[in-house]
Image (cartoon, grey):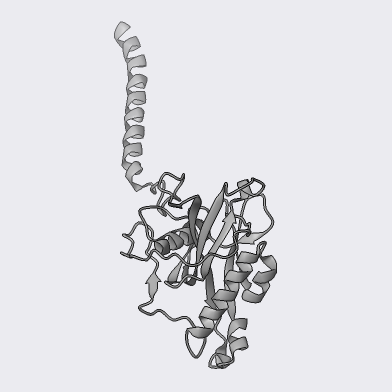
């Protein structure tokens, strides 16, 4: 009688132990096949590596653009026709209704063009070919310091043209930055600040000077944007150009 009672509770206990072993064993085997937590890279945070020039925080950014195919009319050399085919990519920001171009702090471990490419990837999720010739340099104040006196929050920003070759479905800052393709002429009305419209003027000038057909094709004077996680190209481009009027105030 004692032996029968002992088996009655030992057998269920063994079953429970075996079930626990099977559960943890299968869990351990499944773990390696799960996707990595981050497979597209993270956006840089903070300003520990931020470059400054005197009281100015140095900023680098770009105007991503593409030129639509126009079928049988694509061979036209008319300047206005070419510019009608240009679209630029603008991004949204939290709690604001206006659109901006991707840009951010230029850090001390990258060249100015590498910084522009990085910001394009982090904020807009695009890669492409970056012109080495800046569209220009503008001085403005950061959004948080627009009402401050003096040069507090002052930024010196460099903008470049980026011919988009890849539009990514996921990018590091997609939760805070939406994106929108707009015709270049429509972009003027969406720009909040004069310096952004001036940068669009410079983009149009670059495209019209790039060749007979107005297309900005890759050449030795352009920088191919590296893929996330790859080593950036070596560059010694650290340009300083004459700044525009220091009274300009804009979102940084």
Residue 188 to residue 172: above or below = below
Q: Position of residue 238 (x, y in %)?
A: 39, 63
* 241 or 87: nearer the viewer: 241
Determine whether, in the image, residue 152 is placed left or right of residue 235: right
Q: Number of numbered discs present?
A: 0
Q: Position of residue 109 (x, y in %)?
A: 35, 53
Q: Position of residue 240 (x, y in %)?
A: 44, 64
Q: Position of residue 198 (x, y in %)?
A: 61, 70
Q: What residue is shown at x 56% (from left), y 48% (from top)?
A: 153
Q: What residue is shown at x 44% (from left), y 70% (from top)?
A: 128
Determine whether, in the image, residue 101 is placed left or right of residue 186: left
Q: Is residue 40 something one can see in this rendering?
A: yes
Determine whether, in the image, residue 159 is placed left or right of residue 147: left
Which residue is at the far top?
2
Image quadrant holding the C terminus, namely bottom right
Q: Is residue 174 something one can see in this rendering?
A: no
Q: What residue is shown at x 57% (from left), y 63% (from top)?
A: 101
Residue 157 to residue 147: above or below = below
């Amino acid at each position: 009688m004692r032996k029968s009672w002992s088996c009655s509770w030992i057998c269920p206990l063994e079953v429970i132990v075996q079930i626990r072993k099977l559960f943890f064993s299968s869990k351990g085997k499944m773990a390696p096949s799960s996707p990595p937590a981050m497979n597209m890279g993270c956006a840089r945070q903070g300003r520990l590596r931020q470059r400054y020039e005197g009281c100015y925080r140095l900023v680098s950014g770009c105007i991503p653009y593409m030129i639509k195919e126009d079928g049988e009319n694509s061979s036209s050399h008319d300047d206005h026709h070419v510019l009608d085919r240009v679209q630029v990519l603008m991004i949204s920001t939290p709690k604001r209704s206006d659109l901006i171009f991707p840009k951010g702090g230029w850090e001390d471990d990258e060249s100015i063009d590498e910084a522009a490419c990085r910001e394009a990837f982090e904020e807009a999720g695009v890669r492409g070919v970056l012109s080495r010739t800046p569209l220009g340099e503008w001085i403005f104040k950061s959004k948080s310091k627009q009402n401050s006196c003096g040069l507090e929050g002052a930024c010196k920003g460099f903008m470049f043209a980026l011919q988009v070759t890849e539009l990514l479905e996921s990018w590091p800052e997609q939760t805070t930055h939406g994106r929108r393709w707009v015709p270049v002429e429509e972009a003027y009305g969406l720009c909040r600040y004069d310096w952004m419209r001036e940068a669009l003027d410079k983009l149009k000038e670059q495209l019209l000077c790039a060749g007979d057909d107005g297309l900005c094709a890759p050449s030795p004077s352009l920088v191919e944007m590296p893929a996330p996680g790859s080593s950036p190209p070596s560059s010694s481009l650290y340009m300083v150009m004459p700044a525009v009027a220091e009274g300009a105030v804009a979102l940084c």
